[in-house]
Amino acid sequence: MALWIIALCGGLWWLFQAVCIARTIRAVRPLPPGRITPPSGAAPLVSVICPARDEADAIAAAVRTRLSDPAPWMEFIFVNDRSGDGTGEALEAACESDDRARVIHNETLPRGWLGKVHAQQVGLEQAHVCPEGWYLFSDGDTHVRPGAVEAAIAWAEQEGADHVALTPRIIRGSWLLRLCITPLMRLLICSLRLWLANDDSQPRAMGVGAFNLARREALERAGGLDQLRLEIADDVGIARIIKDAGGRSRNAIGAAWVEIEWYRTARQFLRGSEKGVAKARTRSGIVLAGLAATVLIAVDVSPFVLVAWWPSPPALLAAATAATATVLGAMLAASFGLPRCWSLLSPLGVIGGLLITLRAMVIALWRGGVRWRGDLHPLSETAEGERVRL
């Protein structure tokens, strides 16, 4: 009886995920090519705002990719946010030959702000104002191909949207990230209900740090980045406040247009995973979230473990579930530009993700807060400024 209960729980859980993934793949499509006719005027149509901190090893190549887009109606504002390495010098060197690009060196973090959000605000304040303009918030190490911004604006105009987020292709990266990225994408889809992001009747919205395009007027109507001063998930937050203010948000797969080498080392990945613990809000919330994650992941990997009881009937059901899970992982990787071979190692990725999550939770409990981009933020502070709930 126990084996049947485990097999049925695993089967139902993966059936739920299959529905979520299928609906997402159907609703979130690749960004189509498109052209626009930019308005005549002195102010740029698009202000690209890129915060960067301690990214000297990757920033120059990403900047060169961005600047290879010849569009004269774009300006590029790179914010060197209190970097302790050669990020500032690398930015200056990469931008010196392009009049559209500027580098701002930010040395302070005011109380009540998260570092990245404040760096974006610094860039926003330096942007030229165009009545019909757009802001593109994009992580500094992201490679955005020529034509991507134009295609996104064309699609936004076609859809009547005020916000467009593109999911990038994940390239290279540490082995640990590649192992865990497909299970992380499954978690994102199920927790944020990603298939509802393009539904104007639903409050759900999705933003992506690599490519978050927002209409200037809509962002101002939503209260601007001031609304997200202490929001850890600032990328999703931009989409959420625009939609809450009556704007329309759209999400597309941008694997053909946008690439990022996310967390280039395992150490960076471990550090980056720590910020997500803030969503538990309190110490007791962290403990409960840890227990829930352990149970959920046990159910997730149970079909692969239960196959060991072959050829019992519960093991046959588990084998069918495990095969379905493998196919779903491959479909997800193919659709969203994730490492395909690594998607086949889903059980190991899930277990690795659990260990990384538990590590982050223990560290947060010990510190009483989360460390993000070099700054320590108390749980009470991030809970107070939260605008995005999972």
Image (spheres, grey):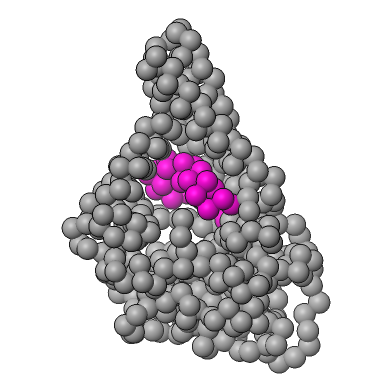
Indicate whether residue 190 is drawn in magenta. Answer: yes
Q: Nearer the viewer, residue 67 or 266?
A: 266
- Residue displayed at 56% across by 31% down: 15
Q: Please tell me in which quadrant of the rendered image residue 364 appears.
A: bottom left
- Residue displayed at 37% across by 32% down: 298
Residue 312 placed where, x, y %?
45, 8
55 relative position to 362: left or right: right
- Residue displayed at 45% across by 14% down: 315
- Is there any visible trace of residue 177 in the rendered image? yes
225 relative position to 375: left or right: right
Q: Please tell me in which quadrant of the rendered image residue 83 appears.
A: bottom left
Q: Quadrant of the N terminus?
A: top left
Q: Nearer the viewer, residue 361 or 2?
A: 2
Indicate whether residue 342 is drawn in magenta. Answer: no
Outermost residue on the front side: it is: 1
Q: Which residues are magenta?
A: 168-194
